Image (tube, rainbow, N blue to C red):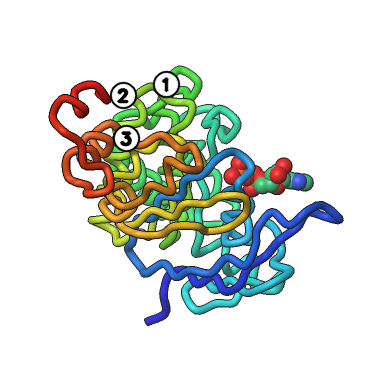
């Protein structure tokens, strides 16, 4: 079986601007949950726009489930990849939660009965089944973003990209989204690519990709990245609290006496 995503020697520049992606290569297996972290401007969104067939690939190759991403395959790729963006308010199009989740299916001409079932199923999957007739704008941030996720999964993609989809939410809302992602990954085998600024959120993912200035500079499990990844500190990303503690206690590089440990905390 083909991997979910294969990126080979991918470089990209906008018009005549500088290279914003530089020879990026990686593979994502089906069902993996990948977190992508990095400073603003490091190329994360550009990368996902190339994977999600929003921008054309100009240098290098991107493959999604064995399909090469080129302009001729864009609509096919859109059936495989769903994207959830940062601000749920910008994504609402329906007057009720049900209308909203149904919107994409309507565009594909799915018959009403099937559409209704799929909308209910998608809302149940994100634990929003009771909100069918509610107005989206009256929901909490976490609930809105769960409705946006339902709109994406109703179209049955096998890869879901979250482009800073938690960044406008409070900790409770972020927790709701992470619970939903975990459930979708485990129960539906969805491949998840999650761009986030909140490094705590990466702890549950299978692997973390660290981007810096257009390059993929690190890639590994959360343990690999945080226990042995002094690089993260060097590029100025803040480690999650649990990992700062672990690093101080267990990492040989960061070995300190008990007194030093107390001082550092
Ligand atoms: P990130 O998601 O990590 O913040 P982006 O992929 O959005 O990074 O941006 C990478 C670089 O590409 C930045 O220097 C940004 O200014 C530039 N960029 C992003 N979108 C465009 C665009 N539409 N036109 C020109 N430059 C862009």
Mark yes or no: residue 198 visible: yes
Closest to the camera, between mark 2 and mark 3, is: 3
Contact (Cβ within 8 Å) of mark 2 with mark 1: no
Of callouts 2 and 1, the N-terminal one: 1
Residue placed under numbered mark 2 in the picture:
172
Q: Quadrant of residue 67?
A: bottom right
Q: State the mark number for residue 139.
A: 1
Q: CA distance from mark 2 to mark 3?
A: 17 Å
> Secondary structure beneath disc 2?
helix
Q: What's the residue at 28%, 35% (across, down)?
A: 244
Seen at 56% across and 27% down, the residue is: 89
How far across and how far down the image is residue 72, in percent? Answer: 70, 74
* Residue drawn at point x = 41 percent, y = 59 percent: 219
Dot in front, 2 or 1: 2
Q: Is residue 130 or residue 201 the one in the foreground? A: 201
Residue ranking furthest to the top: 138
- Write down the residue under mark 3: 240
Kindly tell me whether residue 102 is visible in this rendering: no
| Mark 3 or mark 1: whose residue is earlier in sequence | 1
Residue at (50% x, 79% y) in the render? 66
Q: Is residue 110 above or below residue 42?
A: below
Q: Secondary structure at mark 3?
A: loop
Q: Earlier in the sequence, mark 2 or mark 3?
A: 2
**Residue 173 vs residue 82, the one in the foreground:** 173
Q: Position of residue 21 (x, y in %)?
A: 65, 58
Quadrant where the N terminus is found in the figure: bottom left
């Amino acid at each position: 079986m083909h991997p979910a995503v294969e990126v080979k020697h991918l470089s990209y520049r906008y018009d005549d601007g500088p290279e914003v992606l530089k020879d990026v290569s990686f593979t994502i297996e089906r069902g993996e949950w990948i977190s992508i972290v990095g400073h603003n401007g490091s190329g994360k969104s550009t990368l996902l726009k190339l994977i999600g067939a929003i921008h054309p690939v100009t240098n290098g190759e991107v493959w999604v489930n064995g399909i090469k991403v080129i302009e001729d395959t864009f609509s096919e790729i859109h059936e495989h990849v769903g994207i959830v963006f940062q601000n749920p308010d910008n994504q609402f199009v329906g007057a009720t939660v049900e209308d909203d989740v149904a919107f994409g299916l309507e565009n594909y001409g799915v018959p009403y009965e099937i559409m209704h079932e799929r909308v209910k199923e998608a809302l149940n999957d994100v634990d929003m089944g009771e909100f069918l007739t509610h107005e989206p704008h009256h929901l909490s941030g976490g609930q809105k973003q769960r409705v946006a996720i339902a709109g994406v999964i109703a179209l049955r993609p096998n890869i879901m990209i979250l482009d800073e989809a938690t960044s406008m939410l409070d900790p409770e809302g972020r927790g709701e989204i992470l619970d939903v992602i975990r459930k979708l990954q485990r129960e539906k085998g969805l491949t998840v690519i999650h761009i986030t600024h909140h490094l705590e959120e990466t702890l549950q993912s299978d692997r973390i990709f660290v981007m810096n200035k257009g390059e993929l500079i690190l890639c590994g499990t959360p343990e690999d990245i945080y226990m042995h990844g002094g690089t993260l500190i060097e590029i100025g990303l803040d480690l999650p609290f649990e990992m700062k503690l672990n690093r101080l206690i267990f990492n040989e590089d960061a070995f300190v006496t008990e007194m030093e440990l107390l001082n550092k905390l």
